[in-house]
Image (tube, rainbow, N blue to C red):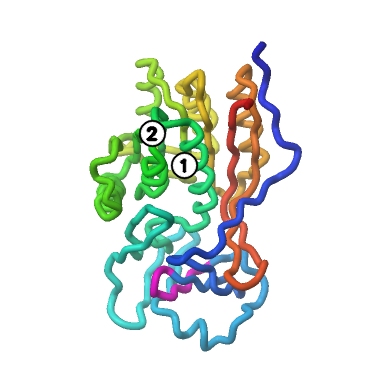
């Protein structure tokens, strides 16, 4: 008999710690000091309400500093030398480019490494025929992680530029011949069409922005549109699906809210829903920065 999923009673904190090509060196005073490959980078982080641990000289030696121009992530980089061109980074057996964008990040989000570890484990457990849909896939690191673990991936993003970056990352990783479909389309329109086609996926990654526009000027608003898209994603999960992962960065959202949204749309499928927060942990201390909220469904085992 089908049952409703069980929602975990307590939050789970998924912590990303340093790896060879990334570290959170220090944080405080509304900023964070990070290492990306050989470059030290200073970025704003309003949640860092505590004082920095390291002296100002450590921060002043950064290769790049982001100066915000507003509260919507926009701004400009200041470089100690000349502008830094895209450079190679790696996580596990996946390679990708770091590049300085006008939106204070480097074309990927390091705290997502906790999700990458989990996704790799789920794909390996699902087997070689696993089909994954990655919506709002951006520069494709999660798609490459899944493909490297053996999945056939459909990567969807509304930005031609992001799709181009993702293809470049696949080439850098030596994965251009992996079974990855790169689709530039509005995520909601794509999933609506997949529902009509009765397509099925063994896993869905859903990582929407707070606000966005599709290639044909479709408007995306997280709070208004996420429930419908989550419902559609639940409809295209295969009978033997391995997971659905929902991630959101909006300040007004919470992990428990995402968890109960998933529970509402996965009624009758049983399984378990975990929810919580993604956090970056400093390289040499236990201090952490919470940056994103998530919820994820897995079937009964």
Residue 222 locus on image (x, y percent): 51, 39
Q: Is residue 102 left or right of residue 268?
A: left
The span picked out in magenta is 36-44
Residue position for label 1: 208
Mark 2 surroundings: few (<14), some (14-19) or many (≥20) residues within 10 A: many
* Residue at (36% x, 47% y) in the render: 140
Residue 39 included in the magenta stretch of the image: yes
Report the front residue among 134 and 16: 16
* Residue at (57% x, 56% y) in the render: 291
* Residue at (36% x, 46% y) in the render: 144
Residue 5 locus on image (x, y percent): 66, 25
Residue 183 visible to the viewer:
no
Q: Is residue 74 left or right of residue 25?
A: left
Residues at badges 2 and 1 in contact (C-beta under 8 Å)? yes
Q: Earlier in the sequence, mark 2 or mark 1?
A: 2
92, above or below 82, in the image: above
Residue 13 included in the magenta stretch of the image: no
* Residue at (39% x, 26% y) in the render: 191
Residue 10 visible to the viewer:
yes
Label 2 element class:
helix
Quarter the N terminus occupies:
top right
Mark 1 surroundings: few (<14), some (14-19) or many (≥20) residues within 10 A: many
Quarter the C terminus occupies:
top right
Q: CA distance from mark 2 to mark 1?
A: 9 Å
Residue position for label 2: 187
247, above or below 3, in the image: below
Question: Principal SS element in the magenta part?
Answer: strand
Report the front residue among 127 and 208: 127
Residue 88 locus on image (x, y percent): 32, 63
């Amino acid at each position: 008999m089908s049952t409703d999923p069980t929602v975990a009673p307590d939050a789970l904190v998924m912590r990303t710690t340093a790896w060879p090509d990334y570290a959170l060196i220090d944080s405080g005073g509304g900023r964070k000091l990070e290492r990306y490959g050989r470059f030290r980078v200073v970025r704003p982080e309003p949640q860092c309400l505590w004082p920095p641990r390291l002296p100002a000289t450590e921060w002043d030696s950064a290769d790049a500093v982001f100066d915000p121009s507003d509260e919507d992530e926009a701004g400009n980089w200041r470089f100690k030398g000349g502008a830094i061109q895209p450079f190679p980074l790696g996580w596990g057996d996946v390679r990708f480019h770091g590049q300085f964008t006008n939106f204070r990040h480097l074309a990927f989000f390091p705290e997502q490494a906790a999700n990458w570890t989990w996704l790799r484990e789920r794909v390996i457990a699902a087997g070689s025929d696993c089909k994954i849909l990655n919506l709002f896939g951006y520069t494709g690191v999660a798609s490459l992680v899944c493909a490297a673990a053996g999945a056939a991936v459909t990567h969807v993003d509304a930005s031609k530029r992001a799709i181009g970056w993702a293809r470049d990352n696949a080439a850098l990783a030596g994965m251009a011949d992996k079974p990855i479909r790169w689709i530039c389309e509005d995520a909601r329109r794509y999933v609506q069409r997949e529902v009509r086609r009765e397509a099925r996926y063994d896993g869905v990654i859903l990582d929407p922005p707070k606000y966005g526009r599709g290639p044909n000027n479709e408007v995306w608003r997280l709070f208004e549109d996420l429930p419908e898209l989550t419902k559609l994603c639940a409809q295209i999960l295969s009978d033997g699906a391995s997971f659905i992962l929902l991630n959101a960065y909006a300040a007004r959202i919470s992990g428990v809210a995402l968890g109960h949204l998933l529970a509402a749309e996965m009624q009758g499928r049983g399984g378990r829903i975990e929810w919580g927060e993604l956090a970056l942990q400093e390289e040499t201390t236990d201090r952490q920065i919470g940056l994103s909220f998530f919820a994820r469904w897995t079937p009964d085992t």
